[in-house]
Amino acid sequence: MKNKLHGSIIITYRCNAKCNMCDVWKFPTKPTDEIGLDIIRKLPEMFFTNVTGGEPFARQDLPDIIAELRKKTKRIVISTNGYFTGKIIDLCKKYPDLGIRISIEGQEQSNDTIRQIPDGYKRTMETLVKLREMGIKDIGFGMTVQDLNAKDLVPLYEMAKGMGYEFATATLHNSHYFHKWDNKIQDKDVLIGEFRKLVKQLLKSKKPKEWFRAYFNYGLINYINGNLRLLPCEMGTNGFFVDPVGDVLVCNGMDKKEPLGNLNNQTWDEIWNGRRADEVRAMVRSCPKNCWMIGSVAPAIHAHPLKPIFWVLKNKVGLIK
């Protein structure tokens, strides 16, 4: 492979949460229409794979999907709302090297208001504690920062730090993936202020990975301010998505779904190296959305290692001003 690929495999649009920033739960896929192992086998080799949804643990055959993906990738992380504790624990018993990332939208009141899952916060915390008791190492949680939960950002980071968990952040955005076009930050100053507090906390760490996370959270501040993105977009070159019906996408954040092809009736090489792929990559190069990479820091650091390093060296001592 010319490029090391990271893939996000959206295995379902079924979801038990009704988050205020995402309407995917209103448009669930039918189990009979969702990609199966035959499609998973068509995927290329990857250095990192995120299994996401919807809620991935809504799939009864998730263990079989993971077993097949393990033949394709060095590392698998499942993004979940953490509600299905028993299923998560059983899967991690079988594959203790799995990464689990649980969405928490703040402290208990904020989380349950935003996600609208009865006792969702308590169930999530139960899952996190049991995973730790099992000795699962690759655990983390993250939040999508908005007006309703901005003040919970730093306390949630402190909780993650105290529990020894990874902590990822994102902020409100719209896309065809979410079926949302009205997500909007009302008080930018408050969000930016909270992100600045988080950046300062991250830069105090002795761990270089936390410094990189400071850089990416600074990127979220830059995004909220409407400025040009700090790094060029690598989607369609180093990264891709596959949706539940087999469409291969370069990005799930575009205003309109622009598939490169479909794995139900094409091979990976036909899709990735075809004329349509070149057309969509051209759309990415001229994409006006100016979004910022969210989720795992690893893919972007792999693609652009120097700029985050220089930024960290410049800001590590004086923090960010």
Image (cartoon, rainbow, N blue to C red):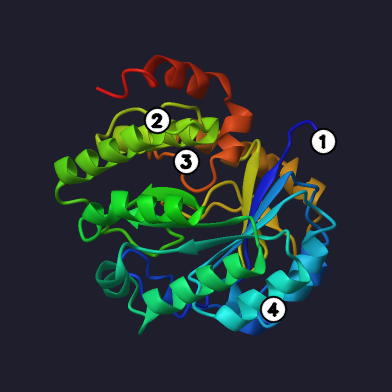
Q: Where does residue 46 sit, x and y in percent of width and height?
A: 75, 46
CB under 8 Å between discs 2 and 1: no
User: Quick check: 308 left or right of 240?
Assistant: left
Q: Amino acid at mark 3?
A: Met
Residue 293 is labelled as 3
Dot 4 or dot 2: first in sequence order is: 4
Q: Height in image: 104 above or below 279?
A: below
Residue 292 in which image quadrant: top left
Mark 3 secondary-structure assignment: loop
Mark 1 secondary-structure assignment: loop
Residue 203 is labelled as 2
Residue 90 is labelled as 4
CB under 8 Å between discs 1 and 4: no
Distance from label 4 to label 3 (Cα)?
31 Å
Mark 2 secondary-structure assignment: helix
Q: Where does residue 243 sit, x and y in percent of width and height?
A: 61, 63
Dot 1 or dot 3: first in sequence order is: 1
Residue 1 is labelled as 1
Distance from label 3 to label 2 (Cα)?
19 Å
Dot 1 or dot 4: first in sequence order is: 1
Looking at the rendering, in which quadrant would you find the C terminus?
Answer: top left
Q: Amino acid at mark 4?
A: Asp
